Image: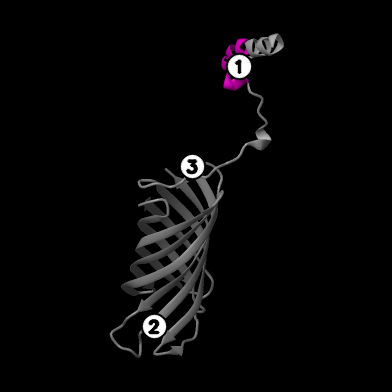
Amino acid sequence: MKKAAALILLVFLAMPAFAQWDDDDIPFDPEWDIFITEVYARGDQTFMIALGLTFPTLFMNQGNRLPNNLNLGGTGTLTYMFFLDSRISVGGTLGLMFNSTIGENMVFMIPLGIRTSYQLLFGRFEFPLHVTLGVNWHRYLDFTYFGYFMQFGTGAFFRFGPDWSFGVDTSWGWHPQWTGSRRTTVHGNFVNLLFAARFHF
């Protein structure tokens, strides 16, 4: 009985020493540092800059495939997104696309659109799925056209820290040119592959 009482007394006397042990003194192995992706919340924002390639793939008129007179080109985008909740965000995107022709001329397009995105999270990896609707300015030699475009895409990003993520973004875009005549209307399809950096704030 006396031994038990002495043991209990010893435990109570040692408790203040444990209470004064500062957390900074606890041994820490940096190899066990675990990164936990912050959950997005309403009001979170991202700004993305991306550069890459645009592939002219399919051109149609009245169900018939037209010859592809465009070569592989370049593209770049600036995109701002505002999160409505932990998964859904809305924003806008401004891009530039250019392709050379087989006649060694250049086609330029400047798409400006509203984007909606749904994002999947797996640890440090983020996979946004996005839809963009907007207007597109075309220029080829002296010909200009202002029309409509629609784009579907997805991305894969690795979150390096709270502020930055890096990855790739790919999309398929439909860029029609309605001329008022079904015989000359062209439905252009482009696939874009971009390397992107996103800033989170």
- Front: mark 3 or 1: 1
* Kind of residue indicated by mark 3: Asp
Quarter that holds the C terminus: top left
Quarter of the image that includes the N terminus: top right
Q: Residue furthest left?
A: 180
Of residues 22 and 13, which is closer to you in this image? 13
Q: Where is residue 116 in the image (x, y as percent from the top left)?
A: 38, 61
| Cβ–Cβ under 8 Å for marks 3 and 1 | no
* Disc ID at residue 186: 2
Q: Which of marks 3 and 2 is in front?
A: 3
Of pointers 3 and 1, the one earlier in the residue sequence: 1
| Crowd tier of the residue under label 1, counting other residues whose Cα lies within 10 Å: few below 14, some 14–19, many 20 or above | few
Name the residue located 35 percent from the left edge and 87 percent from the top edge. 184
Determine the secondary structure under disc 3.
Answer: loop
User: Residue 108 in the image: x percent, y percent?
Assistant: 41, 68
Q: In this picture, which residue range is highlighted in magenta?
A: 12-25
Cα distance between the residues tagged 3 and 2: 42 Å
The amino acid sitting under disc 1 is Phe
Amino acid of disc 2: Val
Residue 88: give x, y in percent of width and height: 39, 56
- The disc label shown at residue 18, or none: 1
Secondary structure at numbered mark 1: helix
Residue 81 within the segment the image draws in magenta: no
